[in-house]
DNA sequence: AGTTTATATAAATCATCATTTATATGACAA
DNA sequence: TTGTCATATAAATGATGATTTATATAAACT
């Protein structure tokens, strides 16, 4: 495996957020901080799995957390990242429009 | 290929670009259109593999292509997408800074 | 037509990583 | 201190998807 010639940071960020659950979690958190329990309720997945993905997001520096009693509150660690989630959603929508009208109709 | 080609949303866009080669290709293309051969030279990977990933990007509507003689030129299909690649890089850099100083030192 | 160049495709293998299941930790309250 | 609630971790399984290898097409020459 050779040393890549492109920006490794962008790719690392992508790898971390390009998962269904993690992106779903970030969509929730882009609207404000939440406890683990609230996230579990909202996205209706098993708690251990949610915690597992939160750990991954945290290790990547994408979210940060804070203990409040027995609860743990998670939030996206910067405004830029929060905005990026929305920008990705918007870009997805735009592709949808492009594809409806022209190129990539199956 | 199991990356969906229709009903695009943020997650599907991510799935398509969160690959080392595909993100590398997009970084190249964010600076202007290129032929397959030029991309192969630049990123130093096998041609069939590059073509394979270009096909995936095209099916997702992220790039478009045009034949010119025996060459095929690829480009990113919208300004917004091109900008998004850069925004992802920048967000990655920012995380790097955050992590250097605080949380996620490995 | 046959040859070279540029690109695409397909099948098989291999690697990665999400999920499940089970259990552990840590905080608060009775 | 014991019980319960909230969250975390770890091992095993399973699914997905990237890469390799080999071959196919298509265009522009001779």
Image: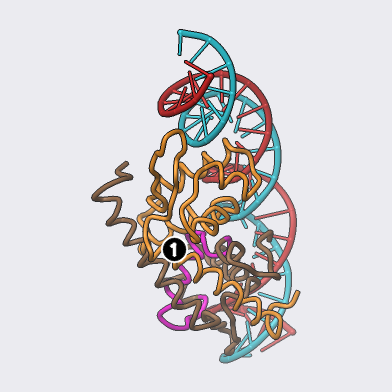
Chain colours: A orange, B brown, C red, D cyan
Q: Quarter of the image containing the N terminus of chain B?
A: bottom right
Picture residue at 45% right of the left edge, 40% below the top: A72
Residue A95: x and y in percent read: 61, 77
x and y percentages locating residue B42 in the rendered image: 41, 71
The magenta segment? B15-36
- In percent of width and height, residue A105 lies at 73, 77
Q: Chain of mark 1?
A: A
Residue found at x 59% / y 78%:
A94
Q: Does residue C9 appear to the left or right of A76 in the view shown?
A: right
Residue assigned mark 1: A82
Q: Secondary structure at mark 1?
A: helix
Rendered position, A4 above or below B60: above
Residue at x-position 29% and y-position 43%: B105
Indicate the quadrant containing the C terminus of chain B: top left, top right, bottom left or bottom right.
top left
Percent of width and height locating residue A35 = 50, 45
* Placement of A41 over or under B56, stated as above or below: above
């Amino acid at each position: 495996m050779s040393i890549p010639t492109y920006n490794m940071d962008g790719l690392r960020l992508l790898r971390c957020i390009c998962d269904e659950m993690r992106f779903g979690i970030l969509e929730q958190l882009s609207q404000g901080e939440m406890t683990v329990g609230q996230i579990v309720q909202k996205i209706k997945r098993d708690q251990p799995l949610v915690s597992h993905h939160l750990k991954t997001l945290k290790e990547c520096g994408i979210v940060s957390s804070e203990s409040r009693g027995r609860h743990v509150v998670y939030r996206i660690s910067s405004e830029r990242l929060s905005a990026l989630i929305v920008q990705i959603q918007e870009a997805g929508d735009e592709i949808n429009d492009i594809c409806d009208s022209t190129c990539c109709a199956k």
